[in-house]
Amino acid sequence: MALELRGITKRFGALVANDAIDLEVRPGEIHCLLGENGAGKSTLMNILYGLYQPDEGEIRINGKPLRLDGPRSAINAGIGMVHQHFMLVPVFTVAENVMLGDERVKGPFLDHRSARGHVREVSERYGLAVDPDATVGDLPVGVQQRVEIVKALTRDAKVLILDEPTAVLTPQETRELFTVMRRLREAGTAIVFITHKLKEVKAIADRITVIRRGKVVGTATPDASEAELASLMVGRQVRLRVEKTPARASSAGPAFSVRDLTVRNLAGQAVVDGIGFDIMPGEVLGVAGVQGNGQTELAQAILGLITPEHGSIVLDGVDLSAKSPRDRLRAGLGFVPEDRGHDGLVGTSSVAENLVLDLYDRPEFGRRGSMDLKAVRRNAAERVEEFDIRTTSIDQPVGRLSGGNQQKVVVAREMSRPLRMLLISQPTRGVDVGAMEFIHQRIIRERDQGRPVLLISTELDEVMSLSDRVAVMYGGKIVAVVPADTSTEKIGLLMAGANPEDVVDE
Amino acid sequence: MSEQPTEKKPAPATPESGRTPPPPHGLKRVVDEIVDGSLLVTVLAVVLALFFGAILIIVSDEEVRGTFSYFFSAPGDALSASWAAVGEAYGALFRGAIWNPDSSWNVATAIGPFSETLTEATPLLLGGLAIGLAFRAGLFNIGGQGQLIMGAICAAAVGFSLEGPVVVAAVLSVLAGIAGGALYGALVGFLKARTGAHEVIVTIMLNYVAVSFLVWLITTDAVKNHERYEPLSKSVSEAAELPRLLSWLPEGGGSLRLHTGLLIAIAAVFFCRWLLNRSTLGFELRAVGANPSAARTAGMSVGKGQIMAMLISGGLMGIVGATQVLGTANANNALTPSIDAGLGFTAITVALLGRASPVGTVFAAILFGALQAGGRAMQASAGISLELVTVLQALIVLFVAAPPLVRGIFRLKGAGGSEAALASKGWNG
C-alpha cells in the first residue's frame, strides 16, 4: 500500500507548521523523516494520524484521496502509530493493552483467549517476542515499545509511523528495534521513521526526507555523509564534534564528592543505591544510563528535592546534605533539570521572569521584599543577547518558545550566577542542533573555568563527547567509571546491566 | 486591564514546543481557562446574560405571558408588552444602580444610586481580591465564608469592648478582623503544606465550623443581645463603627451608607497589585501557583508560599467580615447568623469575572455591586424578584467560563485549532 502526501499545509495562527509538504512512502520501505525539533515532523504525523486536519493538500492511499477525521479512521485506513510516549495502560497485561479500543468479546465478556492468541500470532509472524500475559508496567521500555508495535500490527497497519522510537532505548535495544523494522520491511510494511539522530538514519533508512521550518528541504539517500545531512537539517554548516581540550589535571583534591548516597522510593526500593563519586575541579563527569536507572533521583537528591536515606554531598569542603535546595543553590550549585517544562520553567511567566526564577530575591533583583523590575528587564536583555535566545520579546511567555530556546533560558539563568559546580541533566533533550552546539560549548566553558560538572544524559553520544570520565548507572548503582574513550559497545553493555568484570575482560 | 506581566497559557497550537507541562486537571483547568479569557468575551457574556435575563422577565410576567396566548393574531401586543416589561425592569435596574433622572435634583439624591452600588461593591471587591490572590497561587479558596465569619467575630469582639477614640477603635477592630480571617486562612495553607490535604475540602469543612461557632457564640450570655428575641449579638461601640463617607452632604447625605470600607478596599487593590507584580513574595506565589515543581527546583518553598497566600487571602476576607459588622450588614452593627450574606461565594464569581487580577476585580465588583443595588430598585418598582440578579450573575460567570459558547453565539473566531490541540494533549499528555 503506497501512501502519498501532496502539498500538505497546516497553519497555527501565524505559524506555518507544515508548508506544502510532499511525501511518498512505498510498501516495504523505511522512509526517514529527518528534522530538528520544531521542524514540523510531529505535526505532519499528527495529520497523518487524523489528529489534525490539514488546511491544504491531500492524503492519498494507492492513489485514492483519503479524509482522516480521527485516529479511528487512520487505523481503518491501515495507518498505525507508535508514539514517543507510549499509550499503554501499565496495570493491564500485554493482551489487554493490545485489545484496548478493539475489544474482542464473547457475549457480554471480553474474549481474553482469542486476544492472547492474536498477540501470539502477530508476534510470531514478525518475530516480536512478547508474552501476552505479562503486565505492561513490569516490562522494560524496549519491550513496551514492541507491545505498541504489536498493537499497531494487530490492527492490520500497512503503514507504521514510529515517532522518535529510539529516544528511550539502550544501544542494544535500538539494534533490536532495527532488526524488527527490517523484518517488517521484508513483510511489505511501509515504515515512516521520525528522528533527528543522524547515525540511526544512516543505519536503517532506504530514503530520507529532510524537513526544516515546516518545508521539505531535500531528500537524500543513506550514503550521504552525516555532515551533509546535518547541514541540510539545520540549514548551515554545523560542528558535530564538541571541540575541547583534555581536562587539565589538577593537583588539588576533588571539588565535589558524593559518598554512600542512598535514596528509597515510597515502596522502599533503593532507587539510588549507595552511590559515591568525586569530581575534580575542571572536570566533566558524565553519567550514562538508560532512563529510569536512578539518574533523576540522583540529581534530585543532590539539589535536596528529595531526602536521601543516608549519604553525604560535599562541595568545596562544605557538606550540603542538611541544607535546603535554596541554600544549596546559594552555595553555588548550578542546576539544570532534566525536564525543563516541568521543573525548569514557569511556562506562563515571561522570559524575563524565568531568567531570574532562582535569583528574584537577591540583589540586584530584589531588595527588602520588593523587586526591581528594571534590573530584571536589563538582565533579561543581556541574557537574551549573550545566549542568543530567539524570542520576540522578553515579555513573551516562555512556554511559547521552541524547546531549544526554552533550554537556553534555563542554561542562561543557571550560568549567569556565580557557580562553584554545575549539575546538568539532559542538556539537549528536545533541542535543535544549533542550540545543542551552543549549550555544549557553554558546558565546556564552565569546565574550563575550573568548575566540576556533573552531566547526566541518556544520549550516549553526548555523554561520550562532553565527559572526561563516564560513570555508568544501572539499577541505582554506578556499575563502572570508565574513561571517555571507552567503546560505545562496552558502555552499552554496562548500561544494559552486564557484569562490569565481563565487559572489561572482553 | 493593565495587568503588567501578560499571563497567558503557552500556546496550545505549537505542538512541537517540547515537553510542555501536562495540562492541569479539573478545577485548575477551568480556573485557568477563565483567567486567561479575553475582555471581549467578558463584555459579551454580560450582554448575553442580560438577554437571557430579559427572556426570564418576559416569561415570569403573567400579563406579558397572557399576550403571547394570542401571539399569532396580534403579535404587536406581545412584542410591545415584552418590550415594556423588559424596559421597565432594566430601567429600574439602571435607576437603582447608576443614576435616577426622575429624582429631585440635589447632590445627595443624584449620587445616591451610585453610592449604593459602591457600598455593595466594597465587600465584593475585597472578597474578590482575596479569592483572586489565592487563585494566582494555585489555590481554590472556597473558605471565604469561614474566614469572613472569623474576621467578623474578631472585629466584633474588639468592637464590643473598645469605647476609645473613633479612629483608634475602628482601626483596631478592622485589624482584629484581618487577624481572625488571616489565621483561619493560614490554617488551611498549613494543613495543605504539611499534610497535603486539599484546600477545597478543608475550606468547605472549616466553613461549617465557622458558621456553627458563630451561631453558638451569638446565643452565649456574653455576646447575646438581651433586648431582642431573634439571634443577634450586642452592637459594637459607636467608636468602632466605620465612619460614613458622604454624611456631610446636605439634604439627605445622612442616608447614604457609603463608608470608609471603600477606602480600605481601594488600598487593598493597590496592595494586591504591588504584591503580585512587584514584590518578591508575589513572584514566589505566582511561580508556586503556575508550576510548583519549577518553583521548588528554583529553591522556593511551596508550602510557605501556600501558607502565605492563604494567610493574605484570609486576611482580606477578614476585612470583609469587619466591614460587615462595623459597616453595612445591619443597622445594629451586630453579629447575626447570616452576617456573611453569601459574600464568601459571590466573591469567587467576582474573582473569576475579574480574571483574578486586582484591576479586573475592581470592574467585576462594581458590576456586581450595581446589579445588587439596582436589583433592589427593580424589585421595588418593577416587581421583579431580586433572585433575577442572582440569575444574571450566575449567567455572566457561566458564559465567561465557557468562552467557546460565547464565541459560537457571536460567530467570533476563536483561538485557532483548540479542538485539535485538545486532541493532541490527550495523546501527548
Image (cartoon, rainbow, N blue to C red):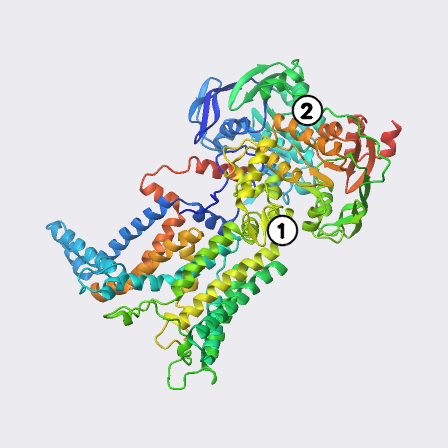
Q: Position of residue B369 (x, y in %)?
A: 34, 60
Image mark for residue A178: 2
Q: Tell me which corner region of the image, top left, top right, bottom left or bottom right, holds residue A502.
A: top right
Q: CA distance from mark 2 to mark 1?
A: 45 Å
Q: Tell me which corner region of the image, top left, top right, bottom left or bottom right, holds residue B93.
A: bottom left
Name the image quarter holding the C terminus of chain B.
top right
All told, the count of numbered labels is 2
Residue type, numbered disc 1: Met
Q: Which residue is mark 1?
A: B300
Circles 2, 1 touching at the beta carbon (< 8 Å): no
Q: Residue at x 60, y 37 (%)?
A: A409
- Report in which chain the residue with disc 2 lies: A
Q: A129 or B334, which is in the foreground?
A: B334
Q: Position of residue A497 (x, y in %)?
A: 79, 36
Residue type, numbered disc 2: Phe
Rendered view: A277 above or below A226 = below
- Report whether residue A384 is seen: yes
